[in-house]
Image (cartoon, grey):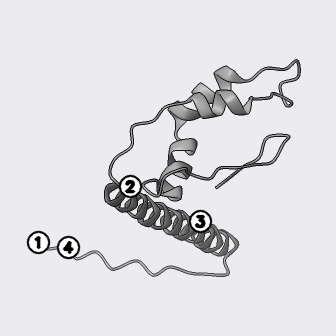
């Protein structure tokens, strides 16, 4: 897992009980990002710095390696599914726009089913 502030850091777990994808998920969590932001110092909004000591001082609840792996796999699966749904929605939106443009310009026609009127 690489963390890219204005210095290059490479996190290497000191224990084989830590799944790197779990650490990546933990680092991307909103609560972790907010905590990291609270450590940031510097005068420019785009040039904030976080010390390595501050990053390493953060604590996290660590489930068993098996649970870390399972959770990471589930999150990865659902993230991919979510990405696929977003792509599909984007494609359907583009198709809808194309169909509407065709209808509005007369290039496409729609046949409505005949209404059946019963006495």
The residue at which mark 3 appears reads as 90
Quarter of the figure that contains the C terminus: bottom left
| Residue 107 position (above or below residue 50) | below
- Distance Cα–Cα, label 4 vs label 1: 7 Å
Mark 2 — residue?
68
Query: Is residue 15 depicted above or below 76 in this figure?
Result: above
> How many residues crowd mark 4 within 10 Å: few (<14), some (14–19), many (20+)?
few
- Give yes or no for contact between labels 4 and 2 (Cβ–Cβ under 8 Å): no
Tag 4 residue: 117
Percent of width and height locating residue 112:
40, 77
Labelled pair 4, 1 in contact (Cβ < 8 Å) = yes
- Judging depth in this view, the residue of 113 and 30 nearest the camera is 30
Tag 1 secondary structure: loop
Badge nearest the viewer, 3 or 2: 2
Percent of width and height locating residue 39: 68, 22
**Residue 7 lies in what quarter of the image?**
top right
CA–CA distance in space, label 2 to label 1: 68 Å
Instruction: Please report the residue visible at 45 percent of the width from the left and 81 percent of the height from the top.
Output: 111
């Amino acid at each position: 897992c690489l963390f890219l502030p204005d210095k290059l850091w490479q996190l290497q777990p000191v224990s084989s009980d830590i799944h790197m994808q779990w650490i990546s998920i933990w680092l991307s969590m909103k609560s972790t990002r907010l905590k990291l932001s609270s450590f940031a110092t510097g005068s420019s909004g785009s040039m904030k710095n976080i010390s390595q000591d501050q990053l390493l001082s953060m604590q996290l609840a660590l489930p068993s390696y098996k649970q870390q792996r399972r959770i990471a796999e589930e999150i990865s699966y659902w993230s991919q599914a979510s990405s696929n749904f977003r792509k599909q929605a984007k494609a359907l939106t583009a198709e809808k726009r194309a169909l509407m443009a065709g209808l509005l310009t007369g290039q496409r026609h729609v046949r409505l089913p005949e209404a059946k009127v019963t006495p």
